[in-house]
Amino acid sequence: MKKILFFLALFPLFMYGQSLIEFKCPELDKDFENYNALKGGIKSQATKLMSYNHMNDDGEIQYQYILETDDTICIQRFMSVVDDWVNKVYKNPKESLVSKTENSCEYKANIPNVGKFMGMSKITLISASLYFKVDVKPNRIRLTGRVKHYQLIQGSLSGPKDVLCSPNTVFPFTESTNEKSYAMAFCNSNATVMNTIDSFLKYLNKNYNTQEEKKQKDDNW
């Protein structure tokens, strides 16, 4: 019985003539470890997180990982998995689409309330714009998540306020008003970018190696 089960487990490999691919990202695991080790108040956490320097030259929060593999990646099959993941994660995939080619795509999402303060005389809410991009070549993939800007909406006795800014123009990168709210926005934005990339990687590892098999079964009813 064990030999039969072993053969059945290998059946997809014989059928499609390729080995299973597992996409691993130790750098992402390390970034999660650093984030989970943050201590102290929210401003202290933001300052420590800033030291890991996940920023690009445009002042955006950015995490980028390149994963290489010895096995050849089927680009069409890979992008099919990307499409499936996008349809599950994004409420309006067509409206969220920024750009798309045969081997890359980028989507935008709004993250509400990444930073907030609720007071007697002032209410501060910060949202963020998250961009997630996937690029694939036959032997590697590149995953990029970035927060381009914050949008602060504030209501107070002096009237409403709406401010759009880059992450590097406010706390913890410089002294600013609403420092606790921006510290919260910075920490939550970093976490959301990592969680988005992690979500995609888990879905990719679960579905890439079975994607072709499912299509084969569907096509040959």
Image (cartoon, rainbow, N blue to C red):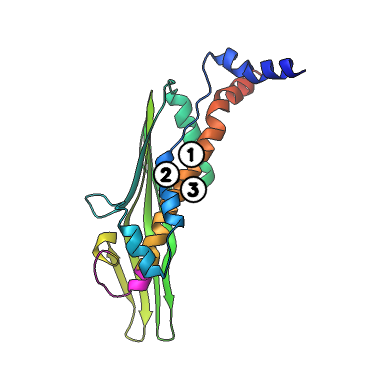
Mark 2 or 3, nearer chain start: 2
Q: Is residue 101 above or below residue 49?
A: above
Q: Amino acid at mark 2?
A: Leu
Question: Is residue 176 a member of the stretch shown in magenta?
Answer: yes
Residue matched to label 2: 28
Q: Residue at x 34, y 61 (%)?
A: 48
Q: Is residue 135 in view from this perspective? A: no
Mark 1 or 2, nearer chain start: 2
Tell me the quadrant of the picture where the C terminus can be found. top right
Residue matched to label 1: 201
Q: Amino acid at mark 1?
A: Leu
Q: Is residue 51 in view from this perspective? A: yes
Q: Amino acid at mark 3?
A: Tyr
Q: Are marks 1 and 2 in contact (CB under 8 Å)?
A: yes
Frontmost residue, 138 versus 123: 138
CA–CA distance between discs 1 and 2?
A: 10 Å
